[in-house]
Amino acid sequence: MPLNDERPSSTSSSEDQTSDGESSSECRESMATASDLESLRDSFNSDISSKHCTPSSSPPETLTLDEVMEAGRDLFNLKLSHDIVMNREFQPHPNLKAKNSIWNAVKENVQKAFWDTLQAELNDDPPEYKHAIKLLEEIREILLSFLNPGANRMRTQIMEVLDMDLINQQADNNAVDICGLASYVVTTMGKLCSPERDGDIKKLQELNTENIVTLFREILHVLDLMRADMVNFAIRSIRPVLQVIGAEYEREKFQNVLDKTPNALNITTSWIQAAIEELLSVRKPAELSNNPEKILQGLPGPSQIFNTAFLRLLTWDFSKSSVPETWVVDETQLEEIQRQLKQAVAVNTVLLIVFSTIGDRIQGLSVLSDRLKRMITVLLNGMHKPNFNLKETLEGTSVQICCELNKSLRERDFPALTPEQQATLTGQICSIGQKDNPVRTLVEDRVHQYFMGLLSDPRPEVKLQEAPAGLAAIQPELGVIGKAFITLVNYNRAVYAPFYMEIMKKLLFFSDPPATSLPQEPAQGSIPHD
């Protein structure tokens, strides 16, 4: 919220008629206000500690194709670095065949044409080795790429055996030992591969060398696997380094993108603006006065804005608005966290309704509670999908719950639920999908408090295991979801905090708020209603 219009202005001609005492008082008030503003700005600047952290942007300009491609490479490198740091299981795999893929169909046809041509050439009398020699040259380059810089002896041997000039001369005289060259390639691969590929090498050695085309096809397949192994080894080796410098590296790459596309923070700016407006909307009436000192006291601090903005991500409507640019690399993880959280809220809401409706007869039965929780979780699985019929599912869930409750009550010599009780229970469970359902709203508020507590605490590890009252049933799930969310938030803040601070300062002190605004978001973790 800009304060430009609220700063004391210079004295007009009419003000010259006031007393010297009043003018002196106004001057002191103006100086004090300016001092307060500078102090508040300093509180934002204090969070930017590195000389590499100050973001900058250039005026909009027309980009050349090379600049667009370079920005794309920066984004790719940023995403790759982020995945390596954040996902310990991350590793690329050879492309899997996608069903009904035009690209895959074209690729298969081209490969089939190559192998058919190779087979036809080798079956000629005398054989033609044009495509076979090209294939051997490609295989040689792949083998050389596996070598360490100091493996000169192996490099020399490969170059001597797979000497393309010599092989071409042999081909001219129909003296190429193509089977012997293939056997050498397989033997060399066995020396260079990782232990987990020993089985694949053994299969190559067992293939009939008379069917040379099949052998070469399998050699290329295993070479692809070996290249993937090499990349994964490099990733494991570089991960410790990226964990140290990853945040600075990603910040640098994002700055490169921002230099070429200065509007690359528009959605991020609107996201932070919405958080500021949310905080300012709950100010006390006294803070809305024209007193500059009270206005300054009512402004939210950086931590408040951070936490409020991060919390809004848990209810982000991905179908209506793209995520902030600084969260694009984590969009998939955010969607998964949101799906898990909505399902946990729904499960907890149903359990609260069951135990509050039935009362003392089932209180303290942990076995029954666990059984109901597992059943409800399974039945509500996939509730985030567009074609999921929540109303119909809740009706079926109610029937299953009533059966489980009656079974448990009879086992302990209690009377079964009456038709009226079952109807009441079913109606309450089916109503949780309605807008402003009180039980679901209560659960959402508690979940909101839980995550705000995690964001506000400098050591959230302890609070992860402290579920608020009424959420004990989903405490394990909240702990897992909370840990994943806090991990994303902490790393995002480490990378993009300087950009966030610049945006906050501009919104609060220097300029008018952006015209763009975010769509209205549902309540925390809310369930889509009919």
Image (cartoon, rainbow, N blue to C red):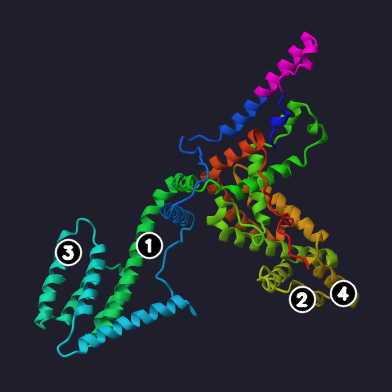
Question: Label 1 sits on what residue type?
Answer: Asn
Residue 47 drawn above or below residue 112:
above
Of residues 377 and 313, the one drawn nearer to the viewer in this rendering: 313
Say left or right for 83 vs 116. Answer: right
Which numbered disc, 2 or 3, marks the residue that appears first in the sequence?
A: 3
Mark 1 or mark 2: whose residue is earlier in sequence: 1
Instruction: Look at the numbered disc 4 and give the secondary structure of its residue.
Output: helix
Residue 390: quarter of image: bottom right
> Is most of the magenta stretch helix, strand or loop?
helix
Task: Give how far across and how far down residue 489 sits, in percent.
Answer: 58, 49
Is the residue 174 above or below the residue 154 in the image? below
Report which residue position mark 4 lands on.
423
Secondary element under disc 1, as helix, strand or loop, is helix
Name the quarter where the N terminus is drawn.
top right
Q: Name the residue under label 1.
A: 232
- Which of pointers 1 and 3 lies earlier in the amino acid sequence? 3
The residue depicted at 73 percent of the width and 45 percent of the height is 278
Q: Mark 2 points at which residue?
A: 392
Q: What stretch is highlighted in magenta?
A: 9-35
Camera-near label (4 vs 3) is: 3
Q: Earlier in the sequence, mark 2 or mark 4?
A: 2
Q: What residue type is labelled 3?
A: Met
Q: Can residue 208 be seen in this view?
A: no
Mark 4 residue type: Ala
| Residue 140 position within the rendered picture, expressed as x and y whole percent measured from the top left | 22, 69
Q: Distance between the residues labelled 1 and 4?
A: 57 Å
The mark nearer the N terminus, 1 or 4, is 1
Dot 4 or dot 3: first in sequence order is 3
Instruction: Estimate the spatial distance between the alpha carbons at disc 2 and disc 4, rounded to whole Å.
Output: 15 Å
Of badges 1 and 4, the one in the foreground is 1
